[in-house]
Amino acid sequence: MTVQELPGAAAYRPTPPPAWKPITDPAPLLPDPEPYRVLGTDAVADVDPELLLRLHAELVRGRRYNAQATALTKQGRLAVYPSSTGQEACEIAAALVLEERDWLFPSYRDTLAAVARGLDPVEALTLLRGDRHTGYDPREHRIAPLCTPLATQLPHAVGLAHAARLKGDDVVALAMVGDGGTSEGDFHEALNFAAVWKAPVVFFVQNNGFAISVPLAKQTAAPSLAHKAVGYGMPGRLVDGNDAAAVHQVLSEAVARARRGEGPTLVEAVTYRMEAHTNADDATRYRVDSEVEAWKAHDPLRLLERELTGRGLLDDEGIARAKEAAERMAAALRDRMNADPELAPMDLFTHVYAEQTGQLREQAAALRAELDAEQDHDEHGAEAGR
């Protein structure tokens, strides 16, 4: 006899447990159909003019920083440099929306965001130079190490933010990632945990059109990357990534929401990588020059200058001052990067394990003996030459 054949079975209608039901109404989580814009719209009247001028000064400096770092790569002073030219509005806004107590989790292309947050420009390039670990103290600056593996910084951001909330610290983590990083498993894991825990995290995707040579259409069939947010139970926001004021506003709202304890937000900024993926990449193999030229008309620096000059907030003298300040920064960066670093070979063994293994101790002793022998040889040679 089955359950249905038992007396009274017709009235028995088991209902799924509450956990089966959708937790969140999906409609409020969906992004707008078009990227949000401020510049050139009525919304710009509500933006603080001082903020617009600061964004402009940082964009000018950022553009020059990218150009100087690219030149240093060609001169052999950097092993590699992934330029963020064309994406400076995203980089600057990400840095400026955070409080000092907050944390930034950058990817390898986000050196400019780290510099805009206050990191020494040379320290931001040290990892790409290849002569030291990271180049800066993450705890001191509240900037996680520049992350080269795609999207692995996202779970780290969630863990830090969740731990801070458990401790009662008023901290928000902003994690930056490219469109290519959204195809990684770490992206899924980070967003899922963050939403379930309501961790104070902002996931900031810079959709610059290509994951190296792979266009977005080859990565996802979603209407936008921001639409992915609804699958995790968090709001998705779509913003014009070349509109500095719009990016700053959307990220500010997401950070404020996280700080209020309302959970994470996924923000997708639609932008464009004007230069090659790195100096090792030939972008002409997968995109045409006419596409790049079309995006130059939507250059973030040009858009902001047009708004500021049109409103009488910026004149030629102000533009000149911003460029002069950027040139001074570039000159200092160039001079310091042209000085050969003083390397300590024994540092190879300093930060591998908290307590060195026997094998490492043997290797360290062998290197020390070799260095001592080389020093003795140099000293005896100097004495013989006197």
Image (spheres, rainbow, N blue to C red):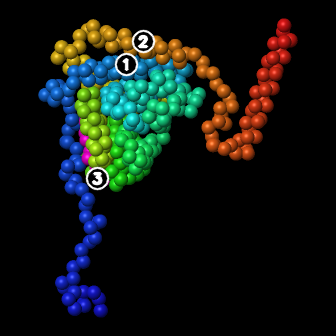
Q: Position of residue 386 (x, y in %)?
A: 84, 7
| 115 or 211: nearer the viewer | 115
Q: Position of residue 145 (x, y in %)?
A: 48, 35
Compared with residue 79, is residue 7 higher up or lower down, i.e. above or below?
A: below
| Label 2 vs 1, first from the N-terminus | 1
| 182 or 203: nearer the viewer | 203
Compared with residue 4, is residue 138 higher up or lower down, i.e. above or below?
A: above
Q: Which residue is mark 2?
A: 328
Q: Which residue is mark 1?
A: 61
x 39%, y 35%: residue:
101
Classed neighbour count for the residue bearing mark 1: other residues with Cα under 10 Å, few (<14), some (14–19), many (≥20): many
x 67%, y 36%: residue:
349
Can see residue 13? yes
Residue numbers of the magenta segment: 231-240
Element assignment for label 2: helix
Q: Which residue is mark 3?
A: 233
Q: Position of residue 273 (x, y in %)?
A: 36, 29
Q: Magenta span has 232?
A: yes
x 23%, y 10%: residue:
315
Amino acid found under the numbered disc labelled 3: Gly
